[in-house]
Amino acid sequence: MHLFDRLFEQSSRSLASRTSRRGLIAMLAQALTGAALLPLLPVDRGSRAHAADAKAGKAGPEDCEYWKYCAIDGFLCACCGGTATSCPPGTGSSPITWVGTCRNPGDGRDYIVSYNDCCGKASCGTCDCNRNEREKPLYRPSRNNDLNWCMANANASYHCTVSVIVGVAEK
Amino acid sequence: MQLSARWVAALCFALVSQSGFAAAATPPPLPPERLTQEVLPARGPHWVYVVDYAFDNEIDSRVYLYDADAHRRLGQIDAGFLPGLALSPDRTVSAVATTYFARGGHGARTDVVEFTDTATLTTTREIVLPPKRLHAVPTPFNVAYSSDGRFLYVSYVTPAASFGVLDPARGTVLGEIDTAGCMLVIPSGPNRVSSLCESGRLLTVTLDAQGHEAARSMSAPFFDADRDPVFVQGIATARGFAFLSFLGQVHEVDLTGAEPVFAPPWSLLGPADHDWRPGGAQPGAIHRALGKLFVPMHRGGEGTHKDGGSELWLYDLASHGRVARWPLAAVGLKPVVAVEVSQDAAPVVFAATEDSDLAIIDAASGRIRHVTKRVCQTPWQLLTP
């Protein structure tokens, strides 16, 4: 296992073992609200997602077929005043996320992508996008796109979702 | 010929009446009307609650009560943000677990269970929760009653997983129970709650009379979350719940005893069905007395588990045999994303489509009885009262 992957897995498993009804993670998450990315992301150790096709290659950040959106479920922030990697003005990013593993048709590599929700305003309501490659049910939250990942934010309403490359997935 | 002449005469008379004499004989004005308050009729056999997640404006979800015989909406229950819905065992009360923000899309968060009288659709009381309620898509297990109605269980995720135990009669929160990462509240008997774990096991917590934890146990794994996870939208059976897997396995869990008992899984697929899969937001319904299972099925591969079914497949639970296939496009329906069946002796299947139509289907023949176009914005959960 790649060191990068191992680091994330240990981090997430350790966190999982320490989570309690006291809401430790919720407090941590709220304290870190605003950070776009945290090294708390579990990784895909399974096989690859298959977002690579001609359609994905031509699609841009405002298109649901864009390669980085292979496991997204929500409104694309790029249509809501943000970009594929930035939250719209006046919203706050969720420090806790789910991840996908998506293939970039431009270079043929698989990337681990973090899907952070942008929070604190009502739903954007534009560019609804639901793709579910390697997506898992609620009981595997790190791979689940049905949760409101704004849940631990001080302003917990959901607005839209970004996709941020974390790194190249292990071969 | 003589008949035609009479018709001509009648037509002439009508025209004259309309044009010549109408002005002189103006009809009397409409009488004053009296504003009244509609009340629900006695519950019909084919009523259904349609949970509208209102995905484009999630802070404003609703639950609609719909009569499939009259083909009309009967009323509404407000449901806030990412709600859960449960009905009391005697069906007299609905409980909506939800979240409100003080200023609409923002402001202070209040998690709450709101109770509504199902005979009047008036909200009768509420219980305010700690701000930990599960914010997720609909499942039958976001909120659930014990079999005697003494307790109400509410799923919490912060993302640490736990659940709240409420006393609906007194309107209080009795406590909170850590579930060690396992999710949702699957009720059984008067005092047991099971949760689905990433390891493919069921955690079962037994409560004492005060609603506090008395014991817990972890089952053996009954599914593989890596290879073939189960949908969390379990379907009530006569003795517990059935969980469908992404690849079409049926896992029936008997929850009548102190420990869950898992029947050997069986497949929805025949030898020629390898690329067919269940899918959607509510991917199955069971008529418990008749022992029939209805599943929206589609052809697809990895990542299609939320796709609606292009056909409804009907199974006999005793024999595990497929009884029928009902293609939906042939009758003008888009793929079905949520399915439910009434529990009466002449049942109908309620099928919500991906373009938000609600089809009422005769459960015996598959005949479409009625389609209500765009019943709401996003009908992702159906629940029979």
Image (cartoon, coloured by chain):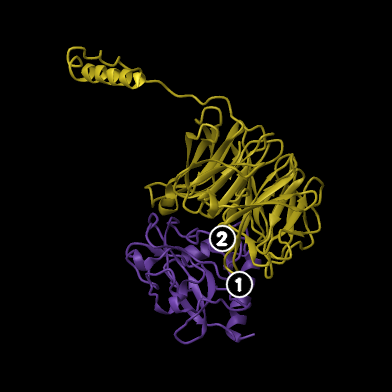
Chain colours: A purple, B yellow
Q: Which mark is residue B82?
A: none
Above-or-below relation of B245 to B101: below
In this image, B11 relative to B295: left or right? Answer: left
Nearest the viewer among A19 and B182 is B182
Above-or-below relation of A72 to B150: below
Q: Residues within 10 Å of mark 2 (few under 14, many from 20)?
A: some
How far apart in space, not on screen, are marks 1 and 2 (Cα)? 26 Å
Nearest the viewer among B307 and B143 is B307
Above-or-below relation of A34 to B355: below
* Rendered location of residue A92, percent (x, y): 39, 64
Task: Residue type at mark 2: give it.
Answer: Lys
Mark 1 vs mark 2: tell me if same chain.
Answer: no
SS class of the residue under badge 1?
Answer: helix
Residue at 66%, 34% (x, y): give it. Answer: B346
In this image, A1 relative to B335: left or right? Answer: right
Can the viewer see residue B128 in this picture? no
SS class of the residue under badge 2?
Answer: loop
Give the image quarter of residue A7: bottom right
Mark 2 — on which chain does it sit? B
Can the viewer see residue A19 in this picture? yes
What residue is pinned by disc 2? B306
What residue is pinned by disc 1? A12
Question: For the view shown, which residue lies furthest in the front direction?
Answer: B1
* Rendered location of residue B175, percent (x, y): 64, 46
Mark 1 — on which chain does it sit? A
* Rendered location of residue B294, percent (x, y): 66, 49
Residue at 53%, 59% (x, y): give it. Answer: A147
Task: Residue type at mark 1: give it.
Answer: Ser
State if disc 2 and disc 1 touch (CB < 8 Å): no
In this image, A118 relative to A139: left or right? Answer: left
Q: Residues within 10 Å of mark 1 (few under 14, many from 20)?
A: some
